[in-house]
Image (cartoon, rainbow, N blue to C red):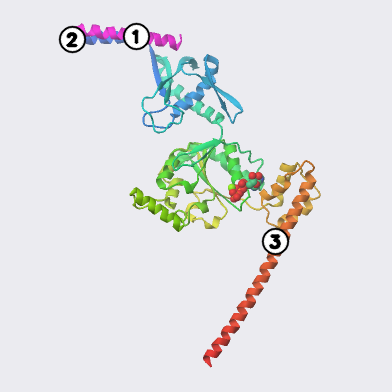
């Protein structure tokens, strides 16, 4: 039996019901109840099926229903066998196809020996909705049909099974996405295909192992967070000079956990309300990133000061609009609420990552443990980091020039970005050894520049000291003259 047969049968039954209603009207009142009861039994006997409908969009919600998405993914593993017309999407960054049944198709599934029918259909919404995630007003739905006698198993076990399996498939096949808030309250995204991984990230191996363990533990701690009554999220503060791998580490984290990235540009957020709107749109299994946090908010918690012209412009605009009311701007407390207030609990399994070049400039409230649970320093290139980069970029594990490079790295402050840049061959003639020589030259130049700078500073300090001495002498003379 197919769903088509069942639908036909259903229409037939509707006709029968209509006739029943007409007959019932002519029956004496004392017979009506009996007649109705027996008739219902007869109908149940002839048509023992139950249908559950899952809409793509719930009323009053502009996000696709979680159940619909999970079912869609779950059915992809079944529909490719059963359905005759399929829809194909490219997934996992263009590496494979995801096949699912087309509209008005049907497939069957089996659970604990019970046969289940799934069908898909769509309708056109008459109301234009404000937010559409798709490209039009089409509203799809899935229908699940099963025999009434299996109601308990289907509703208590099968549906959970479909949801769980569907979610797992969704995470596996979804392409990495990089979101940014280029408008005030909406995210837009591109595919995230950053090649950085923990295998390409040069840093202290122990530190790297700790971070990997931490991430792994976090991603498997759903029950633990529930048990201790915390929302399932974790904060990381990455700090260090420019070019030491902070952004690369975020990309590596996303690739490792297969999470989305939401790159939050705070300077585009007008106020705390906008921030909240953005937050509620972020999905689970994601990393919310605020880069250069020290440049986005000042320490008093107010937004970065606008220059005078900007302030005047804004005032004029407000007066024109007739809205000269108190500005409810983005504040530190708004940001703290965003991280761990009530609103932060919507959505789960999220990392919040801040980066900064100046950790000492941050408000302690922002980075205290519990908010930023792990503080990770990324620093200048040491010999261990260099060896990692040499292996990665040049396939060289040891070389006699390493003995020259090691002390030079200790004497200079070169970032992994600069070291990596030197190690990349610039022409086909260059080989590993010439790249190492380039690096040595660059390190020596840097050392020389640092020496010249230090000399210059020393000379300046001496000049300043002499100046202070002369000033003191002159002052003493003046005091003597005044006294005499
Ligand atoms: N630790 C590292 N391991 C491997 N590559 C690195 C590392 N640090 C930097 N790089 C290389 O340098 C480039 C710049 O690094 P990245 O953008 O991650 O630095 P950053 O710390 O985020 O700098 P900024 O503070 O300016 O944002 C990367 O594309 C990467 O190739
Ligand atoms: Mg960066």
Q: Depth check: give the residue in front, 297 or 378.
A: 297
Q: Which residue is rendered at x = 43% and y = 26% of the image?
A: 56
Q: Are marks 2 and 3 in contact (CB under 8 Å)?
A: no
Q: Are marks 3 and 1 in contact (CB under 8 Å)?
A: no
Q: Quadrant of residue 81?
A: top right
| Disc 3: residue Cβ within 8 A of ligand 1's nearest atom | no
Magenta region includes residue 22:
yes
C-alpha distance separating marks 3 and 1: 90 Å
Residue 356 placed where, x, y %?
A: 55, 52
Q: Magenta part of the protein: which range?
A: 1-27
For disc 2, the marked residue is 29
Magenta region includes residue 433:
no
Label annotation for residue 450? 3
Residue 388 placed where, x, y %?
A: 71, 45
**Label 1 vs 2, first from the N-terminus:** 1
**Label 2 vs 3, first from the N-terminus:** 2
Relative placement, left or right, of 344 versus 256 is: left
Magenta region, mostly helix, strand or loop?
helix
């Amino acid at each position: 039996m197919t769903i088509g047969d069942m639908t036909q049968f259903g229409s037939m039954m509707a006709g029968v019901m209509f006739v029943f209603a007409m007959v019932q009207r002519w029956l004496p009142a004392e017979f009506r109840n009996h007649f109705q009861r027996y008739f219902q039994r007869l109908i149940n006997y002839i048509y023992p099926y139950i249908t559950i409908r899952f809409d793509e969009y719930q009323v009053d919600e502009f996000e696709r229903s979680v159940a619909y998405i999970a079912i869609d993914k779950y059915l992809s593993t079944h529909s490719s066998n059963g359905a005759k017309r399929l829809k194909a999407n490219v997934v996992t960054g263009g590496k494979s196809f995801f096949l699912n049944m087309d509209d008005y198709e049907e497939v069957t599934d089996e659970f604990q020996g019970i046969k289940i029918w799934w069908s898909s259909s769509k309708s056109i919404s008459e109301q234009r909705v404000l937010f559409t995630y798709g490209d039009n007003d089409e509203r799809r739905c899935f229908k699940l049909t099963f025999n009434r006698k299996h109601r308990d198993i289907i509703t208590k076990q099968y549906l959970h099974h479909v949801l769980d399996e569907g979610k797992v498939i969704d995470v596996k096949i979804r392409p990495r996405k990089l979101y940014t808030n280029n408008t005030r309250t909406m995210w837009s995204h591109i595919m995230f295909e950053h090649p950085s991984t923990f295998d390409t990230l040069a840093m202290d191996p122990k530190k790297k192992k700790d971070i990997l363990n931490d991430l792994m533990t976090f991603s498997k701690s759903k029950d633990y967070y529930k048990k201790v009554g915390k929302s399932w999220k974790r904060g990381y503060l990455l700090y260090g000079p420019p070019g030491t791998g902070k952004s690369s580490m975020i990309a590596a984290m996303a690739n490792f956990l297969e999470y989305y990235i939401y790159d939050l540009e705070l300077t585009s957020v007008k106020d705390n309300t906008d921030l909240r709107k953005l937050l509620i749109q972020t999905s689970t299994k994601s990393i919310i990133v605020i880069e250069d946090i020290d440049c986005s908010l000042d320490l008093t918690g107010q937004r970065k000061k606008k220059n005078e012209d900007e302030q005047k412009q804004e005032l004029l605009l407000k007066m024109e609009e007739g809205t000269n009311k108190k500005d409810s701007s983005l504040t530190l407390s708004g940001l703290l609420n965003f991280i761990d207030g009530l609103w932060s609990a919507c959505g789960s399994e999220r990392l919040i990552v801040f980066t900064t070049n100046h950790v000492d400039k941050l408000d302690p409230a922002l980075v205290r443990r519990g908010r930023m649970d792990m503080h990770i320093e990324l620093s200048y290139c040491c010999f261990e980091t260099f060896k990692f980069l040499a292996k990665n970029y040049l396939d060289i594990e040891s070389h006699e020039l390493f003995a020259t490079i090691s002390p030079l790295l200790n004497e200079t402050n070169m970032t992994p970005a600069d070291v990596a840049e030197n190690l990349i061959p610039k022409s086909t003639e260059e080989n590993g050894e010439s790249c190492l020589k380039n690096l040595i030259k660059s390190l020596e130049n840097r050392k020389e520049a640092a020496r010249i700078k230090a000399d210059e500073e020393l000379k300046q300090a001496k000049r300043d000291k002499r100046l202070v001495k002369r000033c003191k002498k002159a002052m003493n003379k003046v005091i003597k003259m005044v006294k005499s």
